[in-house]
Image (cartoon, grey):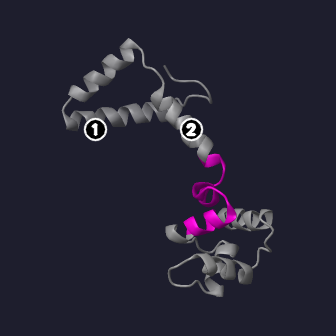
Amino acid sequence: MEFAQRLREAMAVMGYDPKPAVLERELNLRYWGKAMTLHGVRRWLLGETLPSQDKLLVLAEWLRVQPQQLRYGAEIETRVRERRARREAPLGYQDREVIEAFIRIPPPQRKALREVILAVALAYPAKDGESNG
């Protein structure tokens, strides 16, 4: 349903009436694969189905939006950026020492330790903008 809403909004922003006939015509003018049917694009607009990746790319280019924004929404970029920043945050000496020790542990024990760490992280989640370190 959220994809359908974003598709309708993107069409409206570009000056197109968010109707199946308009979407079918404009997509098929730009897409070189098998033509989409009126029923198929109608299902996109109703939120019943999602387009395949190749069609999503054509829609995004036509509507001048990022494909991931059209499929997942604008907040996806923010979440990806935040996760990347956490991953790339500098680690202190003690954290590096623990990570290096973890890597040296045999895989079966690493699996058990990973499950413990994830259970503790679930029990004590960090609040937004803070780390558990």
CA distance separating discs 2 and 1: 28 Å
Crowding at mark 2 (Cα within 10 Å: few <14, some 14-19, many 20+): few
Q: Which residues are magenta?
A: 56-76
- Residue 23 lies left or right of residue 112; in this view the side is right
| Amino acid on which disc 2 is placed | Arg
Q: Residue at x 61, y 81 (%)?
A: 28
Near-viewer residue (80 or 28): 28
Decide which of tag 2 and tag 1 comes sooner along the chain: 2
Crowding at mark 1 (Cα within 10 Å: few <14, some 14-19, many 20+): few
Q: Determine if the magenta segment contains residue 25.
A: no
Q: Secondary structure at mark 2?
A: helix
The answer to whether residue 70 is visible is yes
Give residue 60's position: percent from left, percent from top. 62, 63
| Amino acid on which disc 1 is placed | Lys
* Residue extending farthest left: 106
Q: Determine if the magenta segment contains residue 73.
A: yes
Q: Quadrant of the N terminus?
A: bottom right
Residue 24, placed above or below residue 106: below
In the figure, residue 59 lies in which quadrant?
bottom right
Mark carried by residue 81:
2
Give residue 107's position: percent from left, percent from top. 21, 37
Mark carried by residue 45:
none
- Residue 133 lies left or right of residue 24; in this view the side is left
- Which residue corresponds to mark 1? 111
Q: Residue at x 55, y 42 (%)?
A: 80
Q: Residue at x 73, y 80 (%)?
A: 22
Q: Residue at x 81, y 68 (%)?
A: 15
Residue 69, placed above or below residue 45: above
* Mark toward the viewer: 2 or 1: 2
Give residue 19's position: percent from left, percent from top. 76, 78
